Image (tube, rainbow, N blue to C red):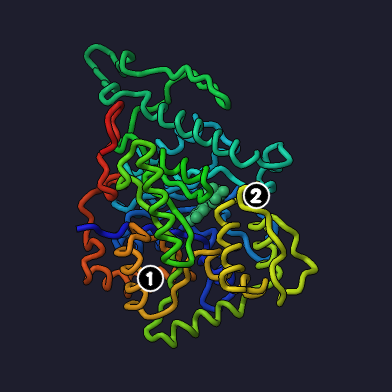
Amino acid sequence: MRRLHLNAFLLGVGHHEAAWRTARADPAAVLDVEHYRHLARVAERGTFDSVFLADKLSTGHAARHNVLTMLEPTVLLAALASATSRIGLIATLSTGFDEPYHVARRLLTLDHVSGGRAGWNVVTSYSDAEARNFGADRVDEHDRRYRRAAEFVDVVRALWDSWEVGAFVHDRHDGVFADVERVHDLHHRGEFFRVDGALTAPRSRQGHPLLVQAGASPTGRDFAAGRADAVFTAHQTLADARAFRTDLRARAARAGRDPDDVVVLPGIVPIVGATEAAARARAAELDELVVTDYALRQLENLVGRDLSGLPLDGPLPDLPAPGEHRGAQGRLELITRLARDEGLTIRGILGRLAGGRGHLVVVGTPEHVADVMAGWFTAGGADGFNVMAAELPAGLEDFVEGVVPELRRRGLHRDHYDADTLRGHYGLASHSRGGASR
Ligand SMILES: Cc1cc2nc3c(=O)[nH]c(=O)nc-3n(C[C@H](O)[C@H](O)[C@H](O)COP(=O)(O)O)c2cc1C
């Protein structure tokens, strides 16, 4: 039977942008490894496939009110590896400002350290504030970023393949540490990178860590369809989610892949209460704590336009066509549609984005949240979900105690792990050199 894939997206003390301001929250926990260890253990109790850490290479524009990602993901996930035994560990690493050799090595190390549980969320980085931390004024133009990402990922995968299975012979008798006939230099010369040698370490249990991608533009979708095992995405409606998944599966087929090998995981921000009224009260409390100035800067960042001076109760100004936007095209399209289809004012849009930056916010009882998830899953809008708790740890605890048993009762979610690698949770075999991934 087809089952949900669940990923726990861990972001500081919660995805709601005001989560850190409630009396329940401990804002200092964003720097506390014990906070993250606890979250990973809770997610493992809920038999999630993975936990996931996002990343951004700048403090962003409004550190006065919130910074979303403070700690480097692979280092933090190495600490979580020792606190857990089964759950996958997905790190965001950017192809924009790094070198394939570094990234291949860091992820392979995480895979060795965790016994085969590493995954990579491949991002291109789309904000100029990040570019300015790496000697450039602006990020590369959109399609060039994806061209670089494609070559980057291909080199990383070739590096993971540079040691064949069994090349690490450690033959004490003959003094042969590695069979160099089975360790292959890359001699890669491409548009963006030159990489000569093989990786420093032999392949890990998984062979290739799981690859995740989250671009929603046409170029981003092609990139994901050609290379990713899972795709994170954001939709407000089931109709949009279905259209996206159908399109992505068609692109995967055109790229010569089995569409079932690309798992689509829309984000969901569950706000759960014992009663619907209790859940609504919690959501309202969070929304009331939003700092308008911060929310406005976030929106400006997403749409690439200065909105200062515009009346909050008026409409959004005309936005660039997504295809002409240098930043994240998928999110611009989502916001444009929200404004158009629902006739929202700027303030209305800020309210809709506060809970989860464009991801679906579902407020209600555990049964209601499970109903929505089951509905999207069976109607072809999702293969699973990227669970983005509004508050952490409380929201993830509520989800695992309330929604997970409900999903299990319906036969939609595992009650124990059959595998102990991340690829195993996805039903993928370990990736052996030259071999197929399934
Ligand atoms: C769930 C989710 C998580 C993401 N995490 C990150 C992240 O951590 N860092 C980042 O730079 N971009 C992140 N993104 C943005 C995408 O990777 C992508 O760069 C962006 O959507 C622009 O792609 P597009 O122009 O193809 O839509 C995320 C997107 C989604 C939907």
Say what secondary structure mark 1 lies in. helix
Give the amino acid at mark 1.
Glu
Q: Which label number is shown at residue 214? A: none
Q: Along the polypeptide, which appears first: circle 1 or circle 2?
A: 2
Which residue occupies 65% across, 47% down? 324
Q: Quadrant of residue 298?
A: bottom right
Viewport quadrant of the N terminus: bottom left
Q: Which residue is mark 1?
A: 397
Q: CA distance from mark 1 to mark 2?
A: 38 Å
Residue 391 to residue 12: above or below? below
Under 8 Å from ligand 1: the CB of mark 2? yes
* Front in this rendered view, residue 163 or 36: 163
- Judged left or right of residue 318, residue 145 is left
Q: Residues within 10 Å of mark 1 (few under 14, many from 20)?
A: some
At 29% across and 51% down in the image, what residue appears?
A: 85
The residue identified by callout 2 is 325
- The x and y percentages for residue 27 are 57, 67
Identified at 47% across, 53% down, the residue is 53
The quarter in which the C terminus is drawn is top left
Image coordinates for residue 83, horizontal then vertical, percent: 36, 54
**CB of mark 1 within 8 Å of CB of mark 2?**
no
Residue 364 visible from this viewpoint? yes
Considering depth in this image, is 131 or 240 the residue closer to the camera? Answer: 240
**Dot 2 lies on which element?**
loop
Seen at 41% across and 37% down, the residue is 109
* 152 up-or-down from 282: above or below: above
Location of residue 100 in the rendering, given as x and y in whole percent from the top left corner: 50, 31
